Amino acid sequence: MKLVFATQNKNKVDEIKRLIGAQHELLTLADLDYEEELQESSLLLEENALEKANHIYHEFKMNCFSEDTGLEIDFLNGAPGALSARYAGEEKDANQNMNKILKELSGIANRNARFRTVIALVIDGKEFLYEGFINGTITTEKKGNNGFGYDPIFQPEGSTKTFAEMNAEEKSAISHRARAFAKMKEFLESEFAE
């Protein structure tokens, strides 16, 4: 099946390309010469993912999916959540976002957090949602040079490494995005096997 991944985030495209397998053809917005930033007007991951997927579906009349991911920190009552990319400002600067969180959690014992991804799939105008999450903690400093976003300060449950200290295969084996994508892939393979 041919699917458009409605995102402008190259890191997310690379992550999904590693997971999709040969059964499906993945197109990106770059493949469609679409350069506009996709709108996210909600504080809910589900609504943002649907908004982006529906926009591209109606624009190109092609089956597609999009996702929205948030880092949800217990001490911050679930923030930054859907505002994760622009937590420290509209520049979407990962280092500024991490620095803001490390400052807000300075001296705080409860550093529990989770990454949560919601994927919205639109096929022939029908909408489907898939969620994946992973629990973990926020470290007291940045560790590692791999990954992107908040990976240097997020240590998944059961691991001694942050996401940024893992290689791509290690992260993909347990990540929130991989878990949500696995649910979508299972659906596609059961409903649209060729």
Image (tube, rainbow, N blue to C red):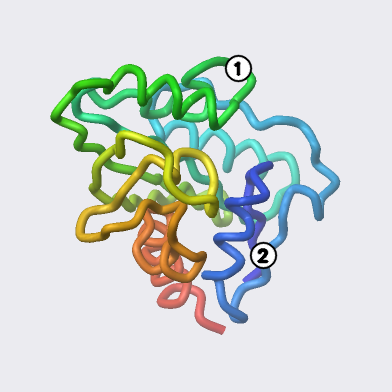
Furthest residue toward right: 33
Furthest residue toward bottom: 194
- The reply to whether the C-beta atoms of the residues labelled 1 and 2 are less than 8 Å apart is no
Q: Please state the horizontal and vertical placement of residue 30, each as a whole percent of the image.
A: 79, 49
Residue type, numbered disc 1: Glu
Q: Residue at x 51, y 75 (%)?
A: 192
Q: Quadrant of the C terminus?
A: bottom right
Residue 150 is tagged as: none
| Mark 2 residue element | strand
Nearest the eye: 127 or 90: 90
Q: Residue at x 67, y 49 (%)?
A: 10
Q: Residue at x 57, y 43 (%)?
A: 53
Location of residue 142 by image quarter? top left
Query: Dot 2 surroundings within 10 Å: few (below 14), some, or many (20 or more)?
Result: some
| Mark 1 residue element | loop
Q: Residue at x 67, y 71 (%)?
A: 25
Q: Earlier in the sequence, mark 1 or mark 2?
A: 2
Residue type, numbered disc 2: Leu
Judge whether 88 appears above or below 190 on screen: above
Which residue is labeled 2 in the image?
A: 26
Nearest the eye: 171 or 23: 171
Query: Dot 1 surroundings within 10 Å: few (below 14), some, or many (20 or more)?
Result: few
Q: Please state the horizontal and vertical placement of residue 51, each as a whole percent of the image.
A: 54, 33
Q: Please state the horizontal and vertical placement of residue 127, each as a whole percent of the image.
A: 46, 48
Judge whether 5 appears above or below 99 on screen: below
Q: Quadrant of the N terminus?
A: bottom right
Q: Please state the horizontal and vertical placement of residue 41, each as a whole percent of the image.
A: 52, 20
Which residue is labeled 1 in the image?
A: 90
